[in-house]
């Protein structure tokens, strides 16, 4: 059975801040913000957030809509740029949808696993 990749929290403070398990993946999706409709690549996602690769980048604080195949549609706000071409999005997932979104995300991650890091090769 394939093992699901998970990125561990960087610190205890980060762990306390994160409410939902972050799932590593490589799912091609779409992101819409400020009149832009672009393809994107979801690198990590949870019920409360996502790390997305996209160009052009949304402005920090911008409202975004994220459509992830096999997972669903979510709205959120661009919060930070963790690396080049990556944006961290805080998702506004209603409590009633969080468990179902997480279940769908886990299944999608098995079908679209993240690329191995150079250290894993």
Image: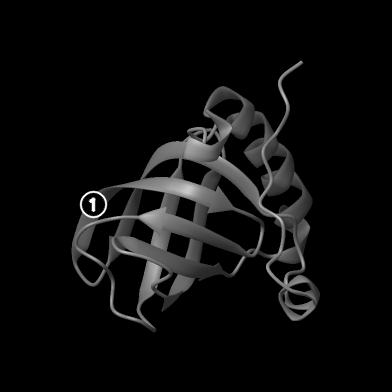
Percent x, y of residue 4: 70, 33
Q: What residue is rendered at 30% in x and 63% in y?
A: 84
Tell me what residue is drawn at x 59 percent, y 44 percent. Answer: 24
User: What residue is at 23 percent from the left and 72 percent from the top?
Assistant: 34
Outermost residue toward the top? 1
Left-right relation of 3 to 50: right
Quarter-of-image position of residue 35: bottom left
Near-viewer residue (6 or 103): 6
Q: Nearer the viewer, residue 22 or 7?
A: 7
- 63 vs 3, left or right, is left
The residue singled out by tag 1 in the image is 38
| Left or right: 62 as drawn, with respect to 2 | left
Q: In this view, does 117 lie above or below 80?
A: above
Relative to 115, say whether 14 is above or below: below
Q: Determine which quarter of the picture holds residue 59.
A: bottom left
- The x and y percentages for residue 18 are 73, 70
Q: Residue 22's x, y, as percent? A: 67, 54
Residue 1, image x, y percentages: 77, 15
């Amino acid at each position: 059975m394939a093992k699901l990749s998970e990125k561990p929290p960087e610190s205890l403070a980060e762990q306390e801040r994160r409410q939902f398990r972050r799932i590593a993946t490589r799912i091609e999706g779409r992101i819409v913000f400020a009149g832009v409709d672009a393809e994107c690549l979801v690198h990590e996602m949870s019920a409360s957030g996502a790390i997305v690769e996209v160009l052009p980048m949304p402005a920090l604080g911008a409202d975004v809509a994220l459509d992830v195949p096999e997972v669903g549609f979510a709205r959120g706000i661009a919060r930070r740029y963790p690396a080049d071409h990556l944006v961290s999005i805080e998702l506004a997932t209603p409590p009633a949808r969080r468990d179902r979104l997480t279940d769908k995300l886990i299944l999608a991650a098995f079908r679209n696993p993240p690329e191995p890091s150079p250290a894993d090769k």
